[in-house]
Image (spheres, helix red, strand yellow):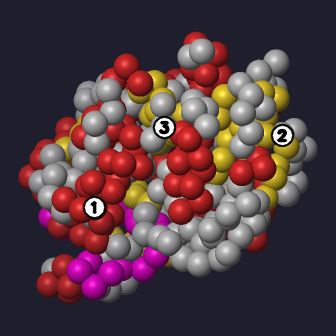
Amino acid sequence: MKKLLIFTPRISGQRAHYYNVLSDLCDLTVISELDTLDELLDDYDVLDKKFKHIVIGGIKFRVNSYEALCLNYKKYFKPKEYDSIIIEQVFTPTAFFIMRYLKRLKIKFFASADGGIVSYNENKIKYSIKKYFISLPNYWLTSGKGGFKYLNNYGVNNRNIYKFIFSPYCEKDLPSAIINEEEKKSIKKRLGIEEEIVLFTAGQPIYRKGHDLLIKTTMSFDKSIGIYIAGGGPNELCINILKSQGKMNDNSNVHFLGLLNKERLKEYYSITDIFVFPSRYDIWGYPIQEAMSFGIPIISSDATIAALELIEDGVNGFKFKNESIDDLKEKLEILLNDDNLRKEIANNNFNKSKLYTSENMAKSIYDIICSVE
């Protein structure tokens, strides 16, 4: 059985499920900079944890969203102790020191990138620093075309990049069937939803998520179509749009749901007719995979890596040109005016989602590391 070491800043509950599955395939040790955050423990601490977990610990400080510099890493990275090593996040101070150390010892290792968006206006200094970080791993794991493009931009050759199946969801988390119309009506009644058609999106109320684009696009839509936005209240841009159209009232068909817990989020996915993801850019886009698993037709901007990787136009949804209200409206009208197409796309999405699980992610990564000697 191969011995595999993974270095990651912190372990989320979703990631822990993937590690558990991977540990069935190999002898897995996971090293994290700090222990898992309390808010991420809901799933993690009830697991029958199969993998070895080592917390290095270190000096806490903030760099982006990571808060540690761990200088006692050397004792965990010894030559010939592991068959393969994966660094899951290269842009942390600790990861930088580990990668330099592995290079110095001539220990080959992988790094992983779930996705990536190329910035063509990046300043030269920042580009050079990132290029150096990205040049250190011998091999890269990435989720698809977006990751290849991102890594190519920093000089990584395709022969050193391997595609894996990416998913934060395990099989047991996915719905077992598409909800039927009677159940949908029952849930809608319980939630107080009166509109015939539900358009749904999920994401933080920030400019990048593009909620304003969805609101602008649907301003002229009939009131039988409800627009439901989960993730927080309206930002200032959305408020101004709604005020200008006289839609800041109880009769508006635009509804901000705030933050939803897992169960309430599932209810809204269950009764959604079309899921819209208008993000101006997203390194991946988890909600797209969530919507797929519920068998929902999806319309997403083409600036979202998950959309580029998972959506086939007309087969399981549509991509619209980023920031284009006209294109988004055109794609919405195609689905709104064709019940049969919506049903066909719903089935295609539900079936496709079964491929994108933590179980298949673990198998695809294990197969890669076995193929690279």
Q: Give whichever of discs 2 and 1 has the lower sequence position.
A: 2
Q: Amino acid at mark 2?
A: Phe
Query: Which corner quadrant of the image does residue 85 belong to?
Result: top right
- Residue 105 badge: none
Residue 117 visible from this viewpoint: yes
Q: Amino acid at mark 1?
A: Lys
First to last magenta residue range: 219-239
Of the pair 46 and 244, the residue shown nearer to us: 46
- Label 1 element class: helix
Q: Is residue 228 above or below residue 109?
A: below
> What residue lies at 72% left-to-right and 51% top-to-bottom?
74
| Residue linked to disc 3 | 137
Query: Which corner quadrant of the image does residue 212 belong to?
Result: bottom left
| Residue linked to disc 2 | 51
Mark 1–mark 3 Cα distance, whole angstroms, equals 19 Å
Residue situated furthest left in the rendering: 326
Mark 2–mark 1 Cα distance, whole angstroms, equals 36 Å
Alpha-carbon neighbours of circle 2 within 10 Å: few (<14), some, or many (≥20)?
Answer: some
- Residue 126 badge: 1
Quadrant of the snapshot with the N terminus: top right
> How many marks do you count on the picture?
3
